[in-house]
Structure formats: C-alpha cells, structure tokens
Image (tube, helix red, strand yellow):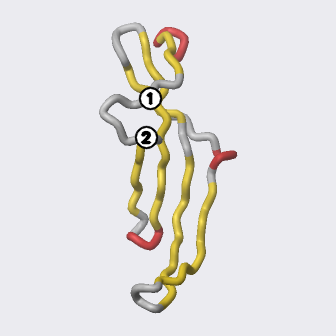
Amino acid sequence: MIFNTQGWSRTTRWDWSKGSQGFNKVDYDYIQPKLFYKLDDTHAIEMPVDVYKDYMNDGRIVVKPWEVEKDQPVTRTYLLEKMK
C-alpha cells in the first residue's frame, strides 16, 4: 500500500439532524492510497480504495473499495519483479 499525502483530508463539522432536532459532530480523515494485490506469481494489480478514520468512533479505521462489487475494478497490472 502506498499513501500519497496530497490526497489526504480531514473533515470536521457540525451537521443538523432533523430527526433528533440537534447538531451532530462529524470528524474524520480521508485518503485514497494505492493498494496492490498479488494476482499470481509474476503480477500484481492496483485496486482503488478509500480509507476513513472516524474520530467520533474511537479512531476506527474503515477501508472501502471505490465500487462495492464482487469483482473489484483493476486500474493497472504490474510485474512483481519491477515493484521491488
């Protein structure tokens, strides 16, 4: 996994909730790292993911694919020998 800090952002705000008739605090970090997955003995693939750290939920980290599907989208294929 490669993290590019240029895409990192932290969001902190208060959102109004009609249901509870009050404000709820939102506070989380967000980044889109490059995730590499070994496909076979000679190839790896890059899969797009989103990573969130929720400060309002004890710093819980959640990793989500860009699209929730059975077969994840592949953006690039790499030779493993070139990645070392």
What is the x, y in percent for residue 27? 53, 70
What is the x, y in percent for residue 71? 34, 29
Q: Residue at x 39, y 70 (%)?
A: 57
Disc 1: which residue: 73
Residue 66 vertical position relative to residue 59 in the rendered view, above or below? above
Residue 33, image quadrant: top right
Marks 1/2: CA distance?
8 Å
What is the x, y in percent for residue 84? 52, 16
Q: Residue at x 46, y 91 (%)?
A: 21
Q: Callout 2, which amino acid? A: Glu
Residue 70 vertical position relative to residue 40 in the rendered view, above or below? below
Question: In terms of depth relative to the viewer, which is nearer, 36 or 66?
Answer: 66
Few, some or many residues within 10 Å of mark 2 (<14, 14–19, 20+) = few
Q: Residue 39 carries which label?
A: none
Q: Which residue is drawn at 47% across and 41% down?
A: 66
Q: Which residue lies most toward the front here?
A: 18
Residue 24 vertical position relative to residue 9 in the rendered view, above or below? below
Q: Which residue lies most toward the left here?
A: 70
Residue 37, image quadrant: top left
Q: Callout 1, which amino acid? A: Pro
Few, some or many residues within 10 Å of mark 1 (<14, 14–19, 20+) = some
Question: In terms of depth relative to the viewer, which is nearer, 32 or 5?
Answer: 32
Q: Is mark 1 on a helix, strand or loop?
A: loop
Left or right of 3 in this view: 56: left
Question: In terms of depth relative to the viewer, which is nearer, 1 or 47?
Answer: 47
- Label 1 or label 2, whichever comes before in sequence order: 2
Q: What element carries label 2?
A: loop
Q: Which residue lies most toward the bottom here?
A: 21
Disc 2: which residue: 67
Asked if the residue at tag 2 contacts the one at tag 1, i.e. Cβ–Cβ closer than 8 Å, the answer is yes
What is the x, y in percent for residue 30? 55, 55
